[in-house]
Image (cartoon, grey):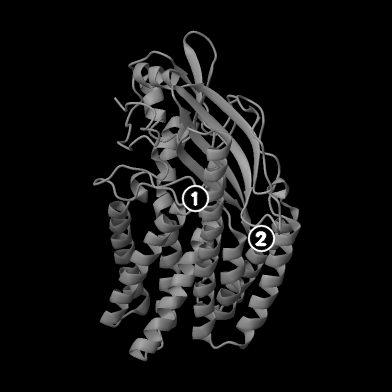
Amino acid sequence: MAADAWSWVVWLIADIRLRQARIPGMDNVTHSLAGLVLAESVMRVRRNRDDVEPSPIFRTTAAVMALIAANLPDADLVYSGVGGDRLAYMLHHRGHTHTVVVALVGALLLWLGGWLTLRWRARERPPTADAAWLGLLATAATLSHLLLDWTNSYGVHPFWPLNDRWYYGDAVFIVEPWFWVLSVPALVAASQRVFARGVLSLILLVGLVLAWRVELVSTGAAMALTAGAVVMIAVTRFLEPPRRIALAVVGWVCAELVLAGGAGVARAETIRAVESAAPGTELLDVVVTPLPANPICASVITVERSGGRYTVATARVSAMPGVMEAAACGTRSEVGGILVPSTRRSSAMVRWDAEWSAMVGELEELAGGSCPARAALRFIRVPGWRVLDDSTVILGDLRFGTVVGNGFTDLRVPRLSERCPPSVPPWRPPRFDLFTPY
C-alpha cells in the first residue's frame, strides 16, 4: 500500500480525537484498517479487471482518501463533543453523519476532493477510469464506518429521514483485536513505504501487548491472537499480492460471523434463563456485548417488565460452557450505584451478577414531566435512575455505568421542566415500549 506520511497523520489525529472524547464506539484504528483494506482490494480488483497497474500517485491518493472516508462519519465529534455537554454528545454523536444519506453526501465531496487532488498531482488529466474507481472506494469506505458501528451495542440509525429508529448489532466488542491480526500483516506486505510498514507493525504489536495485559481478554484468547498473528505474518510472506488481501478480507468476514454466532447463542441462552428465572416476565431487550477476542463469552443486560415493574439484570454468558463456564468469563459485572447483587440462580452458561428494579410509572412520570429527560431517552437504551430530592433525578444508561452520577451518560435532570435542550434530534426512543414519547 502506497500510503504516505500524510495518511498516517490523519489516522493519528482521528485516533487522538476519539480517545479525548471517550467514545464507547468502534475504535478509529479499526475503521482506518478497514479503509486501507478496501483501498488495497480496489487496487487488486482493478488490476485484474482492467489489466492496468494503478500508478503510484493513484495508489497514494486512493489510500489517503479511503483512510479519511472510513473515519468521515465521526466528523460529528466536531460539534457533539464541544463543551463537555453529555446530553449533546449522546444525542448527536452517531447522529446525522452516521446516516446513509449524509454519508453518501460526504463520500461524494470526498471523491471530488480526491479526484481534483489526483489531477493536480498527476500534472495531466488521469484516465477516466480513475474517477470511477475513486468514487467506488469513497462510497464503500464511508459506508463501512456505518456497518462497523452497527455491529456493537451502541447502535446507529442509518435510515433517517425515513426511519428514526436505532439499530444494534450486538455482535462485536468496541475494540476487536482479531480485526487487527487478520488485516495488518497483509497491509504490511502490500506497503511500499518503510514508514507505513513501521506504523502498521507497531499497531499490531501494541494490540497484542494490550491483549496480554487487559483483564477483559482471557489468557486463552491472548494466546490465540498471538498465534494467529504469527500464522498470518508467515502466510502473507508466501502468498501472491492478490491472495494476501483476499485472505485479509475473508478472515475479517469470518471473524465477524464467528463473533456474531457466539453473540447469537448468548442471546438465546439468556432468553431461556430469563424464562426459567422469572416466568411470565416480558423480555423487552437483551443487550449483548461479546468479550474482546473471545466469541465464547459475552456480557449481557436484560430489560424486563412484569406488570407495572421494570427490571434490569446483568449477567455473563458462555456459548460453550464445556470450554469455559460463564463464571470465568471476564470479571463480575459492576455492583454499585443502583445495582445490587442478583438473587437469580446461575448456571454454567449464565452467571447472573446484578440487578435493579423500579416501577414503570416512575419512568413514565419522568418522561412526561421533564423535557431534558425526554431528550435523553432518545438515546438511552437501558434506563436507570436515582432520585436525589423532590426536584432532581440522576438519569443514565446502564450500558455505560451504574448511575452513580459521574458516568458517561449520567445526567442530573429536573423532575418537572418544560424547558427543552436546543436542537433535539428526532431519534425514536429505544425504550418507546416503556413510555409514550410525547
**SS type, badge 2:** helix
Image-quadrant location for residue 46: bottom left
Q: Position of residue 34 (x, y in %)?
A: 48, 65
Residue 351, horizontal then vertical, whole percent: 66, 42
Rendering coords of residue 4 (x, y %): 51, 71
In which quadrant of the rendered view does residue 94 lie? top left
Nearer mark to the viewer, of 2 and 1: 1
Query: The residue tagged with tag 1: helix, strand or loop?
Result: loop
At which x and y percent is residue 180?
Answer: 59, 65
* Point 61% across, 55% down: residue: 319
Q: Residue at x 54, y 88 (%)?
A: 240
What residue sits right under mark 1 in the picture?
170
Give whichever of 124, 54 is nearer the camera.
54
For badge 2, the amino acid type reads: Gly
Q: How many numbered discs sit on the rendered protein?
A: 2
Residue topped by disc 2: 207
Q: Residue reaching furthest bottom?
A: 51
Looking at the image, tell me whether mark 2 or mark 1 is earlier in sequence order: 1
Say whether residue 13 is visible.
no
At x 41% / y 23%, what residue is drawn?
A: 373
Mark 2 and mark 1: Cα distance apart in space: 22 Å
